[in-house]
Amino acid sequence: MRLDHAGVTVDLPPGWEARARTQPPTVPGRRGNLLLHAATVPLPAGRGDFGSGVVETLGPDDVFVSLFEYDPEDAGKALFAAQGLPVVRPSDFSTAVLQRTQLDHSGAQFFFSVSARPFCLHAVLGSHARRAPGAARVAALLSRTSVRRFA
Amino acid sequence: MTALVVALTVAVLLLSVLVAGLLRSHAEILKALHDLGAGLELDRSGTAPVPVTIEGVRGPRPTGSAAPEAISGTTLEGESVAVVLGGGRDTLLAFLSSGCTTCHAFWEAFAVPGLDVPGGARLLVLSKDLDEESATALAARAGDAVPLLTSSQAWEDFGVPGSPYFVYVDGSGRVVGEGSAATWPAVATLMGQAQADGALASQVSAP
């Protein structure tokens, strides 16, 4: 199943759910930025940009991913210098990355640009001890994700 | 005395005509039923039910058949949503309309926090797209608690005959139960039985 929203396309593997919306514009008259959530658990309507309301429901083998777009002019900043979607590895995950420490959860955060669009990717795994298969699930999702220019 | 005999004769004649008319109309009803294929066919071996096809309505889906692999839709807030069924998680799809009277009981039941869904399944409520539905009416029915998506495509993909209608898809992406009832307890019971039957069948068929 393919989710296509605001120039981002995700071809979801079995068992995944994804929701995407366009944020209110930060500058009047300009398009809003994309916020895409994907997870192996149901995504509730009420959830935070970086997964509050969802990550609490993750089982040991579940994962949550948030793709948060920033304003286009930020693409030139050093923070977003990395080009292309990240290649996620188990060693990228740490219990220190989480906004709020969850029991055995693990997180990773990446800043990058694709098609002149700056993003933050925030990924949470249900178990730091099982970060190898969890990271593989995130990597599999990203390998099925594409970003194109969007006016 | 003569008058009494004549009156009785007339009464008997009238009753005879009435009985003959009733017998004739009854025979016509039986003939019409026979033409529809619902008559007794004692010469046919076996006692399988006679299939009846209603134009525009598909027949029942065989239990255990593969469900459409995914659902895509939109929330009332404009979020694009895609859900891939299966993946080890059971899903109960509830096809509801804002205008159907029978659906009211389900909108109310689904709005209660902590709803107990058979088999611990994820509940997804599906209405038709907003060109066929009222966003205001849906928002009033669903509130914030009901996991509602608008997706006429899902109605088409699952061959939904009307609302309310329920489809239970198990974790392997098979339809293990579907149908309709008037109350949530009735649906929960039926879907719970279907889910348990499906799980049992999986255990039996496993080597």
Image (tube, rainbow, N blue to C red):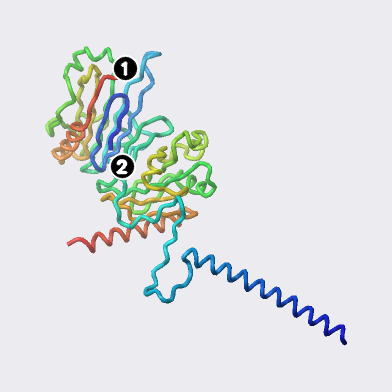
Point 42% across, 37% down: residue: B150
- Across and down, in percent, residue B44 comes to 39, 74
The residue sitting at 75% across, 80% down in the picture is B12
The kind of residue on which mark 2 rests is Ala
Where in the figure is residue A141, as x and y percent of width and height?
Answer: 21, 34
Nearest the viewer among B186 and A91 is B186
Quadrant of image for the C terminus of chain A: top left
- Residue bearing mark 2: B70
Q: Which subunit holds the residue at mark 2?
A: B
Residue kind at label 1, given as amino acid type = Ala
Q: Is residue B52 above or below residue A89?
A: below
Q: Position of residue A127 (x, y in %)?
A: 19, 40
Measured in 3D between alpha carbons, the distance from the residue under mark 1 to the one under mark 2, in whole angstroms, is 29 Å
Residue under label 1: A151
Q: Are marks 1 and 2 on the same chain?
A: no
Q: Nearer the viewer, residue A62 or A94?
A: A62
**Mark 1 closeness class: few <14, some 14–19, many ≥20 residues within 10 Å:** few
